[in-house]
Amino acid sequence: MDIQLKSITVRELVKDYSDRSLSEEGITGWSGNLDIRPKYQREFIYNEDQRREVIKTVIKGFPLSIMYWVKKDNEENKYEVLDGQQRTISICSFYNSEFEILDEHGAWKTFKSLSLEKQEIILNYELTVYFCEGTADEKLSWFTTINIAGEKLTDQELLNAVYTGPWLSDAKKKFSKSNCVAYNLASSYIKGTPIRQDYLETVLDWISNGNITKYMSKHQNDADANELWQYFLRVIGWVEMLFPNYTKDMKGINWGNLYNNYKDKTYNTDILTRRYKELSEDEETTSIKGIYLYLLSNDEKHLNLRTFNDKQKTIAFNKQAGKCVKCTQTFKIEQMQADHIIAWSNGGKTTQDNCQMLCIRCNNTKSNS
């Protein structure tokens, strides 16, 4: 891994600056040799106040955090911004007089309306930049161990920086832009936002069963991300078929994992709907979100059923004189566990008259009755 620390002046950075983001051609600077916003990167997220703070920092000569530029594969002297995009665009767009700052006299000024002295201060300001070059594995190792400052990169953005290519460009178009084609569907089921790569990361996690790096490495040079897109549509279609009555609790569930495990099983939508209503109204069920997982897996742990409190346990323990009702041996209360006499699955409730104390061994080996 070749890593060099250099100083780049704002004058050098803004030379031949061009913003063609609306045409998907990106934003470039540094004599056209720096891709400031590669297609895999997030959209611009700084607000007006944050952009102005960057310019105030530059004018005062205070240091900005170190930036990271990565050499483009197979392109001589061509780099792209890994970290520092927000600060870089703020500087370049101000140089382009796209927004104003408030000067010391309370007047709003664009770059062009500043005094020549102030302009020179900005143009001569030196940015500290790490120039990085290496294999995919070397870059990933480097980027995940350094403390990247500014608007901290997410894990997915780090992977995007390493596995660039036509596949990623297409995947980002589908999952990583504001109002991307996945937005209307994804926003109902996936937490986060597209521009911070939350949608892309989630769907990649689904399709790869948690091994995103392996999947991206395998598909890096694919012509498109149609496989990922079709998989996403299958998952969402399956969910909407089984649970047509959407609830807010469906957002954030690992639907891809459920699809991978249960897509070949047969379910009756009417039964699922009725059981969801019953379980959501059952006072014993404390995890509404877990109902969906239970209905597909039949594993009661997802319901986070009510448990007996300490008072109920003590009353039952004293009533039994410390004896386990199964093996009849005597134990201390901390050596015993509360158990439903009639299991929840058979209609039992978490009430005092349905509480019994079993030793740990008997409780772990019992079956529902």
Image: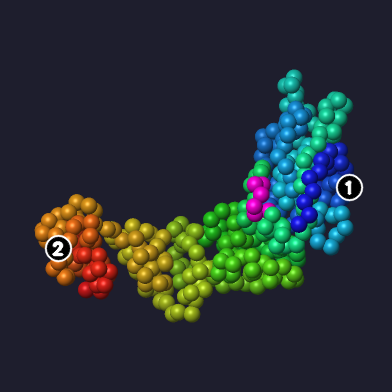
Res. 171 image quadrant: bottom right
Q: Please state if 17 lies on the left or on the right of 151 as rendered.
A: right
Mark 1: few, some, or many residues within 10 Å (few <14, many ≥20)?
Answer: few
Q: Please state if 312 lies on the left or on the right of 32 as rendered.
A: left
Front in this rendered view, residue 53 or 93? 53
Kind of residue at disc 2: Thr
Q: Secondary structure at mark 2?
A: loop
Q: Nearer the viewer, mark 2 or mark 1?
A: 2
Q: Position of residue 145 (x, y in %)?
A: 64, 52
Q: Secondary structure at mark 1?
A: loop
Q: Position of residue 233 (x, y in %)?
A: 59, 70
In the displayed structure, would residue 259 be above or below residue 135? below
Taking the spot 38% from the left edge, 64% from the top edge, the residue there is 302
Q: Position of residue 19 (x, y in %)?
A: 81, 48
Residue on which the image places disc 1 = 31
Taking the spot 84% from the left edge, 63% from the top edge, the residue there is 74
The numbered mark, 2 or 1, whose residue comes first in the sequence reads: 1
From which residue to which does the magenta span run?
A: 143-148
* Label 2 with label 1: CB-CB less than 8 Å: no
Q: Please state if 199 lies on the left or on the right of 112 as rendered.
A: left
Marks counted in the figure total 2
Taking the spot 25% from the left edge, 68% from the top edge, the residue there is 361
Residue on which the image places disc 2 = 330
Kind of residue at disc 1: Ser
Q: Is residue 46 magenta?
A: no
In the displayed structure, would residue 5 be above or below residue 244? above
Mark 2: few, some, or many residues within 10 Å (few <14, many ≥20)?
Answer: some
Q: Is residue 118 visible?
A: yes
Q: Please state if 255 lies on the left or on the right of 30 as rendered.
A: left
Say which quadrant the C terminus sits in. bottom left
Say which quadrant the N terminus sits in. bottom right
Front in this rendered view, residue 326 or 249? 326
